[in-house]
Amino acid sequence: MNKLQYLLAIGLIILSLAMISSAQEQSNLQNMTQEQLKQTAFEALLHAEGDITLMEDSGLSTNFVRDTLLTAKRYYIGMDATDLRNDLENTNGQEADYIRSLIQIFMDTPSYELRRRDYAKTIELTDTIDKTRQRAFDIHDTMPMLVNKEKLYESNGANVSEASAMMSEAMTELGAERYGNAESMMHQAETMLDASMKAAERQSTLDYLKKSFIQRYWPYLLALIILVAVSAKPALNKTRKALAKSKLKNLKQEEATINRLMKTLQEERFKEASISELEYKVRLERYRKKMADIKTEVPVLESKIRQLNHEQKRSEE
C-alpha cells in the first residue's frame, strides 16, 4: 500500500466513525420523550450563550454564531409563545429571565421569520455553535506560538516577511469568521517560517565554510585535490553538527517560550480569574502537546550531536 492509498484508507475510517457517531446522536434524540427533548434543547441554548460569551471575552468575532443562535431560538419558540408563557409561570430565577427573553424575541420577530417548533433542530444548531467556538479557539490559541516562532526565527537571521504577511491575512480571516481560510493560512505561515529558517541556516553554513576554506586553504591551493579528499567527511560532519546545534537551540528557546505562556495562562486562570476553566483547559492542552513534541525531538538532536562529536574526535586522532 503506497502513501496515498494509506491516507485514503485513514480518511475513509475517520468518515465512517463520524457517520456512526452522527447516527448514534440522531438515535439518542429519537429515543427521547418530547419533554426530555425540550429540556435538552433549552440547556443547549444556555450552553450556546456561554460559548458566545467566552468568544467575545477573548476578542473573537461572533456574528455568525449569534445569527445561528437566533435561528436556534426561533426553532425552540415555534409559531406561538403559549408554551413559553406557561413555562414562565412554573419557573423562577435565571431560567425565568431567559424564557422572558425568548418571549421578547417572539414578539420582535416578523411572522414570516418564525419557525415551526423543532427542538432537534435547536440542538443541531447549538452543536454547530459549540464546534465553531472550539475551532475559533484552536486558531486563536495557536497564533501566539506562531508569533513567538516568527520573532525567534527573525532574531536568528531568517527572512520572515512572507510568513508575517500570511499571518496577518490569517488574523483578518479569523476576524471575518472564515475559519477554514484562517487555518490554511496559519499552516502555510508556519511552513514558510520553517523554510526560511532552514534557508538561513544553510546560508550561514555556506558562508562559514566559504570563509573558513579561503582562510585555511589559500596557502595550499596547489594541494587542493588532496586536501578536499582528506577533509570532505569532517567538513560534512561539521556542517551537520552546526545545523543540529542550531535546531536544538531553536527548540530550547521555543520550549522556554511555551513555559512562559503556560505560566501566564495559570496566572490568568488562578490568580486573575480572567479566563474560564474551559478556555484554560483548551489552551493548556495545546501548550502541552507542543511541549511533548519538543521533548521528543530534543533527545534525538542531542544524540546526533554526540555522535558527530565522537566521529570528529576520531578523525582528529
Image (cartoon, rainbow, N blue to C red):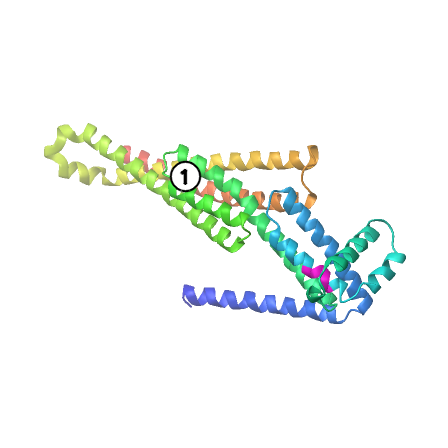
In reply to whether residue 226 is colored magenta, the answer given is no
Residue 34 lies, with reference to residue 101, above or below; the image says: below
Residue drawn 80% across the image and 61% down it: 39
**Residue 255 image point, x, y percent:** 51, 37
Residue 81's quadrant in the figure?
bottom right
Q: Could you tell whether 89 is left or right of 238 in the image?
A: right
Residue 313's quadrant in the figure?
top left
Residue drawn 60% across the image and 66% down it: 18
**Residue 213 image point, x, y percent:** 21, 32
Return the residue at label 1: 247
Q: Amino acid at mark 1?
A: Lys
Q: Could you tell whether 89 is left or right of 43 in the image?
A: right
**Residue 32 image point, x, y percent:** 78, 69
Q: Which residues lie in the magenta part?
A: 71-75
Q: Could you tell whether 210 is left or right of 60 in the image?
A: left
**Residue 15 image point, x, y percent:** 56, 67
Total label count?
A: 1
Front residue of 24 and 244: 24
